Image: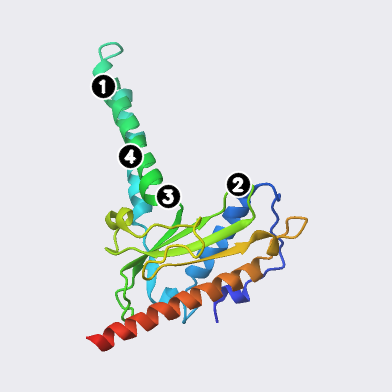
Amino acid sequence: MPSWKSKNFEQEKKAILGDTATIKRMLDDAVVEVLLDSEDDSGLHTMFVEDTSMSNMKLFVGFSAVGASLPSHVFPAPFPHNWWCLLFCCTYYFAASGVLQLLLSFVELESILLLTRRKDAPKVPVPGLNISTHFPRFQSTYTLGITPIPGGAITSLAKAPAFQPEVEGGNTSKHSMQRSWKVEHYFDEEGVFAEEDFMKSVADFLAQYTAMLQADGAEGKKQQ
């Protein structure tokens, strides 16, 4: 049985209904919890594991940007004799910040989780998945989308099929699927989050996607 089904939902989670950022974070956390449920023997967890390469890259770039200031603190000469050292530190910091912004704006976009194929998984037709969500400000529709990452690595993420929440039915490319829900179905007038109901809805959607992958994998095996 999936572990989230035995979770104690008695502790209420509340949000201010106008705070779309908090509401989206609560919904995103619930999606990730269902996706990474290690006790669900029928879900995507049996095929994929979390890919932390993007997070590791951003951490490396961020820490290196902060660490670039170290030479300016230990440089033996005072200002203005250390101007070239300060110039290097500032230039590197702004360059690293630019790299992070480019990753966020053109590669990661609305992605909340990357998955990569397990080495011991059964035949899976895609090497990686990009999980994205969309919940615009002052709107009531939350959209969850799954798109394949052809190369299974972050270098292929920019070339992967795009998440298209503004299009009804989403991206129609192979192995892509998305679903939208009205937020008012999971938050009452006081902002109490019906977390269990939402997680059930997400689990049903993921079960459909898993069944599609399994069917495609079986068909590909027959053709071989």
Q: Amino acid at mark 3?
A: Leu
The residue under label 1 is 85
Please provide percent x and percent y for residue 89: 30, 27
| Labels 2, 4: front one | 2
Q: Amino acid at mark 2?
A: Arg
| Labels 3, 4: front one | 3
Pick whichever of labels 3 and 4 is earlier in the sequence: 4
Q: Amino acid at mark 1?
A: Cys
Q: Secondary structure at mark 1?
A: helix
Q: Is residue 39 visible?
A: no
The residue lying at 29 percent from left, 64 percent from top is 150
The residue under label 4 is 99
The residue lying at 32 percent from left, 36 percent from top is 96
Q: 130 or 175, which lies in front?
A: 175
Residue 158 located left or right of residue 181: left
Q: 142 or 1, which lies in front?
A: 142
Considering every residue shown, the one lying at the far left of the view is 224
